[in-house]
Image (cartoon, rainbow, N blue to C red):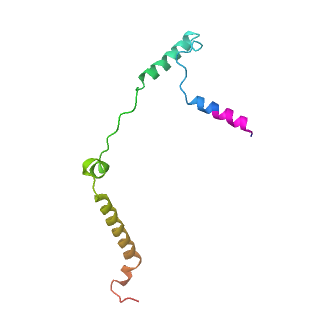
Amino acid sequence: MNFGTVARRAYSTSRAALPPTIGSTKAIGSPKDAARMAKVVNFYKGLPNGPAPASRSSGYQARHFDGNNSSLTPLFQVIGAVFVLSYTIDYHFHLKHHKNVAHH
């Protein structure tokens, strides 16, 4: 495959992501096409304009990471969870075998 083919495919792919030209005079040739074009125009009119509003975080992230109430609590929770998980694994694979018997 040569570079020209790759360039043409990339160009056609990038054009497909762009919206159709709404004011095209070629698109309004017959009443059927005019009705279809009116649907496209109404769709694009219904889309919001401008930048998207900033979303506010909620839940765990809002309580511990955002704003003035950020803290080290999540770090301590992760350390505690790792400790509990590692102790559980140690118990399952090693400690439960020595519960009532001397160490081998």
Locate residue 64, reporting x and y percent: 28, 52
Residue farthest along the left direction in this orientation: 69
Q: Residue at x 45, y 19 (%)?
A: 42
Residue in the picture at 52% in, 18% down: 22
Left or right of 58: which side holds 51?
right
Q: Nearer the viewer, residue 82 or 34?
A: 82
- 3 lies above or below 76: above
Q: Position of residue 102 (x, y in %)?
A: 35, 89
Classified by dominant secondary structure, the portion drawn in magenta counts as: helix
Q: Nearer the viewer, residue 30 or 17?
A: 17
Identify whether 75 is placed above or below 96: above
Q: Position of residue 8 (x, y in %)?
A: 68, 32
Pick the residue in front: 47 or 91: 47
Question: In what quadrant of the picture does the N terminus appear?
Answer: top right
What are the residue bounds of the magenta stretch? 2-10
- Residue 2 lies left or right of residue 91; in this view the side is right
User: Where is residue 2 drawn, in percent x and y?
Assistant: 74, 39
Q: Viewed as shown, does residue 60 lie left or right of 48?
A: left
- 13 relative position to 101: left or right: right
Q: Which image quadrant for residue 75?
A: bottom left
From what the image shows, is residue 97 above or below residue 14? below
Magenta-span inclusion, residue 52: no
Total tally of numbered discs in the picture: 0
With respect to residue 104, does 40 lie above or below? above
Q: Residue at x 36, y 79 (%)?
A: 96
Q: Residue at x 48, y 18 (%)?
A: 41
Residue 31 figure quarter = top right
Residue, far right: 2
Q: Which quadrant: the C terminus?
A: bottom left
